[in-house]
Image (cartoon, rainbow, N blue to C red):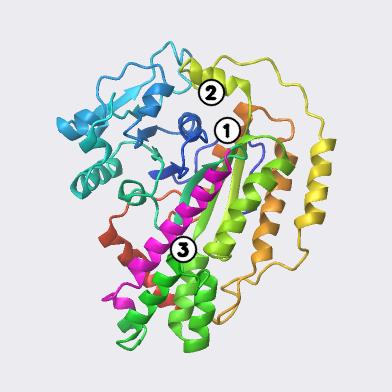
Amino acid sequence: MRGALPAPFAVLESPKTPMKRILTVSSGKGGVGKTTFAVNFALSLATVAPTILVDLDTGTSSVRAAIDAPVTHDLYHFFRKDTPLADCVTRLPPALDPAGRHRDFGFVAGPRHMIEDITNFGESARRKLIGAINRLPASYVVLDMKAGLDANVIDFLPYSNSGILIFTPELPAATLAASDIVKAILFRKLRIVFAPGSPVYSRLSLSPRDPRMINELLDAVEDVYDESIANIDVFLADLAASLGDHPLVSALQASVEDFCVYYVLNMFNGVRESYETAIAPFVSNLVENVSARPQITNLGWIIRHERIHDANRHRRPVLLAPDPEPPRPAAPTAAERELQELEKAFLHLEGPAARRDAGPPVFRPADPARAFERQLEALRAMYADQKESGVRENFSYITHRALHLMESLRSIDFGETRIFGREEILAHLLPRAEATG
């Protein structure tokens, strides 16, 4: 499991070198509890450092509906009245947070009603909002994305990782939608790096015909109706067969292998059902239709619990609700048996894949079996830590995982320091491609 969790996970500590980090929460499809997660995750981060949650699901104002706090300024005022985004931040009233534990939490609400030019804003409005988000005075900014994959989602997502994806065993269609987000971000990255006219071609000594060839191949991979090239791994294998050990092949391979996928399983209902109905289909869709190369990390799960439903109904997020009675210890034997059965059915006991930096850059076939193996390893490790945990502990676990990853990884791997515009992305990706080449 990447970024091993420090113990005890229930005690949150600030990163050693705090800097502004932006974390997106998306699902690709509604009905998975994305906003519930985003609200409570931001509240949890706010116990560590100032945190602002921005509601980018502007057609539903779902964050406003989840928190019973008076909103005086929202995205309507930002877009229509030119109010600075920092002045559109709403703080929690004392009635919701009497002890002041979450005094460093704030949120930017969407408009009260659907307003067409705010819900479906254009490129100039996106640039304005991206710039304002980058300037927000907070250590952590959490973006609650709307469902779907239009430009008002893609342009706010990171370019080298998935952000936090939410899906659930209870809605299989959302699992596939989450993997579609990975595909969209990854292809956005590849299209920018290897677009016609990109300096990567001249710097890697490619012929004038190569940009057209590369982009035609990418068209075939991305087109779900074109079965000539099943996924990026087949594309890379074909390219390696044509070009041999060319730096371009290594650069493409590095671009895909550096991509990080993070997910949270919501409404967790047991290890076997969660694996078979959510995790395995998610990984399978990525492996079959995108690539087996990206690094996939399970950040944790949120158990299915009536307290979450009650909290949403009363517009008091579960982390702001009064402390419940101590949970009864869960019997671990049944879940442990499920894990053992899953390992026998799905686990391929092969050695770990060689690190990409363990030798000279050469093309290596992808290993789909290893992608499934890693998810079972993560599931087993998390169950060992959380087998008696309740809802609050689930959020604490995920928050601590996120903090640890931000401290131990590069910002481009998780929790970017700002949202990059399209024209800036190539400047950050090109040195990596050149170094690999």
Closer to us: 28 or 426: 28
The quarter of the picture where residue 78 lies is top left
Q: Could one spot residue 198 in this view of the protein? A: yes
Q: Earlier in the sequence, mark 3 or mark 1?
A: 3
- As displayed, is residue 166 above or below residue 248? above
Going 67% across and 40% down the picture, which residue do you hit?
7
389 part of magenta stretch:
no
CB-based contact (under 8 Å), mark 2 and mark 1: yes
Q: Which mark is residue 395?
A: 1
182 part of magenta stretch:
yes
Going 52% across and 54% down the picture, which residue do you hit?
261
As helix, strand or loop, the secondary structure at mark 2 comes to: helix
> Residue furthest toward the front?
225
Is 95 left or right of 359, judged from the image as shown? left
The quarter of the picture where residue 64 lies is top left
Closer to us: 187 or 260: 187
Q: Position of residue 103 (x, y in %)?
A: 41, 22
Is 26 left or right of 361, judged from the image as shown? left
**Number of residues whose C-alpha sits closer than 10 Å to that of mark 1, classed few (under 14), some (14–19) or many (20 or more):** many
Q: Could one spot residue 105 in this view of the protein? A: no
